[in-house]
Image (cartoon, helix red, strand yellow):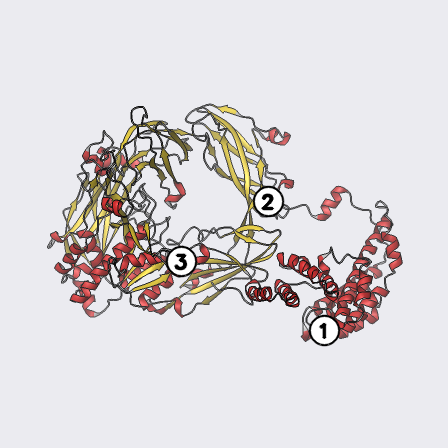
Amino acid sequence: TAADDDDDDDEQVQGRDAGYDVVSGVAPGANVVSFKIGDSRLGSMETGAALTRAMIEAVRRGCDVINLSYGEGCSAPNAGRFVELAEDLVYRHGVVFVSSAGNNGPALSTVGAPGGTSSALIGVAAYVSPEMMEAEYSMMTGGSGGSGGDGGSDAAEDAANMAGAHSSEASETKDDVVGTTYTWSSVGPAVDGDNGVDITAPGGAITSVPNWCLQRNQLMNGTSMSSPHATGCVALLLSACKAEGIKATPARIKRALQNTAKVMPGLSCLQQGSGMVQVDKAWEYLVAHKDDHDEDIHFNVTIDNRAGSPRGVYLRQADEVNIKHTFSVRIDPRFRKDDVDLETQQRRVDFEMRFTLQSTEAWVRSPDHLMLMHNGRSFKFEVDPTGLSPGVHTAKIYGYDSSLPNRGPMFTVPITVVRPLDEQPQISLGTLGFGPAEVKRSFLSVPAGATWMDVSVKDLRDTTVDKDSSPRLMVLHTIQLLPHQAYRDNEADEYLNLVPSQTSVKSIPVQAGITIELTLARYWSAVGKTNCEVSVEFRGCRPSPELIMLTCGGGGGSVKLFSELKNELVQPSAKLTKWLTPLTPKVEGIISPLGDRDILPSEDTRIYQLLLTYEFSQEDAGSFTPRAPALQGFIYESAYESQMMLVFDGEKQFLGTADSWPSAIKAKKGDVTIRFQIRHDKPEMLEKLKGMEIFIERKLEKAVDLTAHTTQEARMCGDAMKKRNLRKGTCASVILAEPARSKLPKECKCGDILEGTVTYEAGSSELSGSGKRPRGYPVRFVVGPKMDAKSAADAKGKEPELPDERSVSEKIEEAVKALKVSELEKLSGKGSEEEENFQDLFASLKAEYPDHLPLLIVGLKHYDHKDRRNDNLENIIDVADGIVSLIDEKDLAAHFGTSYDKEDAKACKDHKDMEEKKSHLIEALARKARAAADRNDGFDDALKHLKKWANVDSDLKYSILALERDGRAERWGSVLKLLNGLIKKNGEDTKGGICPLTKKELLERRAAIFDKLGYSHLKDSDQKWRVIASPKSYALF
């Protein structure tokens, strides 16, 4: 039984595996179980939860082999929660796990997780043969360009070391094409020195696709195709083993594939691993060694006393390759975890193997023999790279069973040495000639002070001599490897369509002191003679520090700028483009066990979830991106099984999803809720995150420019820094001023962060390349506190106030009255259980303060609450009439009919009192009108009275009254127009009014209008959408 991941090309993967029709798959008739790991909410991105559930189900359903055509770059190879679960699946449950190596070549160390970075899996590269090019890609292979050369000056023996340089003598060549791994097929080694690629398989196929593609078959390529091809090969071997009664374990299958693979000419082990899979040879291997118990043992290889327990040796830096090294490597035999029966335990006790050690290269010296026991042993070996030429060199130490050396290595210690060219600010790589699919690699030492490099590639064809003016597709790929960063974080990948005499210049950011690989490759399908002239110039002004952190009132950010390579024109330019708001959980997170499908098959371990809830208000319609820096950016190497955010509006309508690499989510104005699920089988791991903060990132509508100055005095005087020439070997001071408060978004709060970039070089259209470091350097500004409203009023000059001439007893009496009203209001909010107490207290206070308007307003709002208003319509009208009777409307009208003296304290106090009375009057009249409408008595008179003081058409807080008025008049078009406007903003405009309307309520009202108008189809549509627009509960994870 074969298990496959499920995404858009799932049916093609299955057809590749087990197709059984006119055109058969690799393993026709295999039983295929499809597990969907691509989340449609994330554009088919895989999730940790789906990967874990797929592995659980693979064990439950008795799957023999798994294919995973997914993968990502990772910051820590062979590490993380997924790797632990995958190792358990392979080493404990005996499931063979095959996965794509990745589609991110041609540079070194581009293998992806998990296929190219995890020892438990079999990582597969993608190969294309001349016959595939003809049959599948309809390529014309009889072109005039001939078979590509090796670039001229490189010796044939060096070509193999250049990890992909093809000589003209390579077999599998057909005219102007050559058998090769695809240009984009990822290349090893992994950053910890493991080979990365295990085997190679055909990476293209015309096979079945789903019917919604409106065709039965489709051509697709990638390691997503080579991996299922290899999985089909494994299925054949497993099927044969079952039929013949031969034991088949993951260790046996992987070793059989690797020890019998065919080494393809012109390709290095970093591209093809052990070579092209050969099912017949692998089967012969399994039969020949069916009785060898040692075949069931996997041997862990780790380098001692090195951070991260690397699985091989990988030297890239100039200082590393200029000295001789002595390493210690540990070999640990790994038996199947669950085998603890007496016989197996005795095998562990009795286990002793004698190995013959053999190095493949003279620059690596190892012992000749190793005696290995169950608890493992280490041995030392020497690596002397000092005599190697510039380029990439690979070696291996093979461990052969001394009693059966012909069956191939039982374990391998991989060694990769990259020797960079001597450090120079300007480097000419000369004229490079490219044969079919040829890859040329150069490794450069980045000099101190360099912040970017300009790479110039010129097509040397002369149209006066060579009449072929067709474009040549070339791939320029550069990578620097930095600790705990995925290769993608420091790579540039450019596809160049070069025409004769064209020069293309690309500016690429670099890190000084770190070796950079510059790879130029002729695309695998490009035909015709290709010669290029390539040169590199390192440029830059080095800032110290690189990250500028500005704080409110901090005096700006000071940077020292060094020019160490050449004279540079500098003119700093800084912009803030993103706005981040921190959020803390609404309450402490809740940890709870998950259901039966989240029980790990080993020891029946249940997985737990931590659920965190965050809330914020979206002030205006727009997009935002949820950020959880502590967890995002990782999948396979994450310490946690998975994390996922689901985002909802105030009506619980689903807005979007965020996972490891979040995208922007659109939201209308209003409340937003984020539910964040984190999963792990150890609750103590989740306890650490119960109060975790996250960020909401928004793109600023208008970038905020930051001004650069040369001194603090210039900053205070507003004198901006002018363009200047920074001479080689000198240093300049740059001070970035913090932005003015008026330039920031008005909703910015204290503690928010604005992020952007700063570049220091002037740049020029006359220069080749960009003339400045691409993407610049990060700059952040921490927003400080706003001036409060009172302070702002003081600054502008507030209205005068009368002196408080009340006696102490009067002040106490007023304070007591205010406290009583406040306590009554709190009692109203406690619900029906306190209704009797509220009535008694309200009656008592009303008798004590019969003319106190705030008290009556509390009573009015209490009776008009949605849960009790239907039983209190008379009380609403009575209290409202009481409020109206206490307000002299003629005096009120006279006051607002004239202006008042804003410099007279008494006039200002009278105006404030009148404003309060007017507010109470409108509140009372509006609630009375609504109660009259529900009682169907006196609505028109009440509304007429209200309209003297408020515009119910323009003030949407009174939309309920406008809807009632137009409905009574049967003006259904007006009702529908108002409802549509309110629905667009989810009813936000009615909040704070006498009857806030939810989106669900608005949709119900609109459906009723559609019914009255006879628009049954629109009514049905509204009723269906209401379920989505206003669900009763949040969507599940």
Res 595 → quadrant: bottom left
Residue under numbered circle 2: 783
Q: Say above or below: 991 vs 436.
A: below
Mark 1: which amino acid? Asn
Residue under numbered circle 3: 212
Which mark is in front, 3 or 2? 3
Residue under numbered circle 1: 870
Residue 949 appears left or right of 6:
right
C-alpha separation, residue under disc 3 versus residue under disc 2? 51 Å
Mark 3: which amino acid? Trp
Q: Nearer the viewer, residue 385 or 518?
A: 518
Which mark is in front, 3 or 1? 3
Residue 911 appears left or right of 468:
right
Q: Say above or below: 868 vs 521.
A: below
- For the question of whether residue 195 can be seen, the reply is no
Q: Residue furthest left?
A: 403
Res 58 → quadrant: bottom left
Res 189 → quadrant: top left
Q: Secondary structure at mark 1?
A: helix
Q: Evaluate if marks 1 and 2 touch, with contact meaning CB atoms under 8 Å apart.
A: no
Q: Residue at x 62, y 62 (%)?
A: 999
Where does the image place residue 664, in percent across and percent down from the top left? 51, 50
Q: If the image is split into quadrants, where does the N terminus sit? A: bottom left
